[in-house]
Image (cartoon, rainbow, N blue to C red):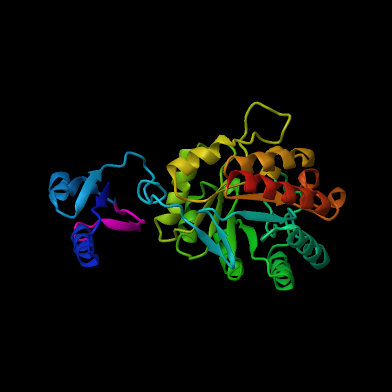
Amino acid sequence: MIAILKQGTTPAQMQHLVDWLKHMNLDVHVSKGAEVTVLGLIGDTSRVDMELLKSLEMVESVKRVSEPFKQANRKFHPKDTIIQAGHVRIGGGYFAMIAGPCSVESEEQIIAVAQSVKESGANLLRGGAFKPRTSPYAFQGMKGEGIRLLLEAKKATGLPIVTEIMNINTLDLFADVDIIQVGARNMQNFDLLKELGKTQKPILLKRGLANTLQELLMSAEYIMSEGNEQVILCERGIRTFETTTRNTLDLSAVSVLHKLSHLPVVVDPSHATGKAELVPPMAYAATAAGADGIMIEVHNNPACALCDGAQSLTPHQFHEVCHKVRKIREAIV
């Protein structure tokens, strides 16, 4: 349920109403816009007398929200959410270029890639320290050492870092990580999501391989319901009957998610296509579709990469992508 307050409602009046609603064991989410203030009521709203609430002089209107996701819902929060990670902002007109290797392999490699992508225009560094792999025999990442090397790259370049968590037992290792990524396979690991909701770090939540957009938003709701409202949604392709590409990139998700939710939406064309030559056109399409950011895998020697070399761009290729993405943004913003 949401209650839209009239213009001119004083802070004291609003607080009195919030206190009254909380007395009914409801959580109240306050969203202040330039023209309206929206109170989002979360919990058992059946005990709220809608007619009584509507009759209050300060209340413009009252509506029930049918969607199961509440805090991620744009009806609760009409303005775009802007996520801050270090000096970088994402959402609400701020665009993120996230780039780096699939896996951290050495100090020399990660620092070299970090320096090159920063020079091209990236403002966030991605790199895998813990790697979920289909085969138990494939490279699983450098784990804690990988995070240490990412932090060394951050010192060298100033780029905030994004890396994936696999298990809540390793959360202490992410103390200095700027954005914690939840991968597609963990999108519905609800125990993990609830624990991340108790942190105050931005969470980049990837859509599962076979999940609907509502299920993605419900996973975001798990994080937000625990108090962490800093969630970034990521479209990374879904599994369909098509086998020419690694996955099928659902670019309509960008528009749909922006309509349903106030959370930023970024697109990962690398995992979606699985082929380096397809990454640039999909990055351009995602930018034109209104994404709040692009996440691209970049490796200084893709042929020798320990993970996902086939979908990784070289630094030179990434430089070209950044140049064209800037041109597209100039045209659409």
> The magenta stretch spans which residues?
22-40
* Relative horizontal placement of residue 281, taking residue 24 as reference (left or right): right
Residue found 21% across the figure and 67% down from its top: 12
- Seen as rendered, the residue at the extreme top is 241
In front of the other: 309 or 96 = 96
Residue found 35% across the figure and 56% down from its top: 31
* Relative horizontal placement of residue 117, taking residue 82 as reference (left or right): right
Q: How many marks?
A: 0
Residue found 65% across the figure and 26% down from its top: 241
Residue found 69% across the figure and 39% down from its top: 282
In front of the other: 307 or 214 = 214
Whether residue 85 is visible to the viewer of this picture, yes or no, is: yes
- Seen as rendered, the residue at the extreme bottom is 155
Instruction: State the image coordinates of residue 14 (x, y, percent, origin top left).
Output: 23, 62
Instruction: State the image coordinates of residue 42 (x, y, percent, origin top left).
Output: 30, 52
Q: Any magenta on residue 35? A: yes
Whether residue 236 is visible to the viewer of this picture, yes or no, is: no
Q: Determine which quarter of the picture holds residue 114.
A: bottom right
* Relative horizontal placement of residue 299, taking residue 224 as reference (left or right): right
Q: Any magenta on residue 262? A: no
Instruction: State the image coordinates of residue 37 (x, y, percent, origin top left).
Output: 30, 55
Instruction: State the image coordinates of residue 43 (x, y, percent, origin top left).
Output: 28, 51
